[in-house]
Image (cartoon, rainbow, N blue to C red):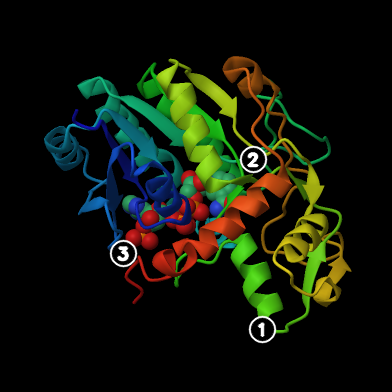
Amino acid sequence: MTKRRVLLTGGSGLLAINWACALREGWDVVLGTHLHSVDLKGVASCRLDLDDPARLESQIEQLAPDLIVNAAGLTNVDRCEADPALANLVNAELARNVAIVAARIGTGLIHISTDHLFAGDQALGSEEDVPCPLNQYARSKLLGEALVQEAGSRVLVVRTNFFGWGHAGRQSFSDWIIYSLRAGKTIPLFDDVHFTPILADVLALTAHDLAARGAAGIFNIAGDQRVSKYEFGCRLAKRFGLPEDLIRRSQMDGVQLRAPRPNDMSLTTAKTRRYLGTSLGSLDEYFEALHIQEQQGRRLELLAAVENE
Ligand SMILES: NC(=O)c1ccc[n+]([C@@H]2O[C@H](COP(=O)([O-])OP(=O)(O)OC[C@H]3O[C@@H](n4cnc5c(N)ncnc54)[C@H](OP(=O)(O)O)[C@@H]3O)[C@@H](O)[C@H]2O)c1
């Protein structure tokens, strides 16, 4: 039986390369790239011109995907603050271009949004809560959500925060902690910033599950446990047998940041769990899976997967 094809934009990104690994056995995965090329076993890749709607339409038509995942984004929060026009272009206008093509060719679209949309004064935000973006990254992602939903009705918008193994040019939060502690470096981690991170693989599989059941609109796909960045680091260190005493408890309040950031980004996954009738797993299960991935070679495979200029 021929496999169904999933096309990811932002193909050289942290999420897309892990998504590809999670799905490559059961799906024909194509990574759509921009400046950086990708070389991953069992996964195809090709350049996509997200900024040229006519070209993009013919490129995607030729690929004939059964599902599209828009994982392209300008993710550096300070860069978005410094260049609001670029943030809006990448996080909103290019997302709209992808959504318009998906609607025209009748393909389902999963659009990756963020957990960064709220003021951060409340825990466990739901899909119905009114966003209150604090910075340009969040404003551009919120605009992106609106534009993709305007462009097509079969769009699943996923609010999330994830971790997994990165590549040489893009460290994840968990990479930074693991590599720093392995090098014997002391690191500060905020105990006044809370989030609900999920392993990238679990995010990918859950999003596919929702899409297969026809879910559309906004869904939170996050971890079921709300933790501070400090607690995340300590529990990760423990699972990887790394020295927790190198982690220094610190606070975001009082730190001068170019872009203001929310103290609480945690999301409730109640709607997603109700829809799927299952939990999304615990942080300890994610850390265990991350550890197994490293033993099975995922860390080294991804480290070298993206061309690094
Ligand atoms: N990382 C997180 O913890 C996190 C949390 C919540 C939500 N998200 C969302 O998840 C998605 C994926 O994040 P990520 O961390 O995987 O991102 P990433 O590692 O920063 O990768 C971003 C990807 O977008 C591509 N891209 C950037 N500008 C582009 C442009 N003008 N045209 C086409 N492609 C472009 C990049 O390609 P080139 O490098 O080749 O330009 C890269 O493949 C984003 O939408 C992000 O907002 C991320």
Percent x, y of residue 26:
33, 37
Q: What residue do we see at 45% from left, 51% from top?
A: 18
Quarter assignment of residue 27: top left
Inspect this view and state whether residue 146 appears.
Answer: no
> Within 8 Å: ligand 1 and the Cβ of disc 2?
yes
Residue 36, label in figure: 3
SS label for mark 1 = loop
Percent x, y of residue 154:
38, 18
Residue 115, label in figure: 2
Mark 1 residue type:
Ala
**Cα distance, mark 3 to mark 1?**
28 Å
Residue wearing tag 1: 183
SS label for mark 2 = loop
Task: State which quarter of the image contains the N terminus.
Answer: top left
**Cα distance, mark 2 to mark 3?**
26 Å
In this rendering, which labeled residue sits more in front, label 3 or label 1? 1
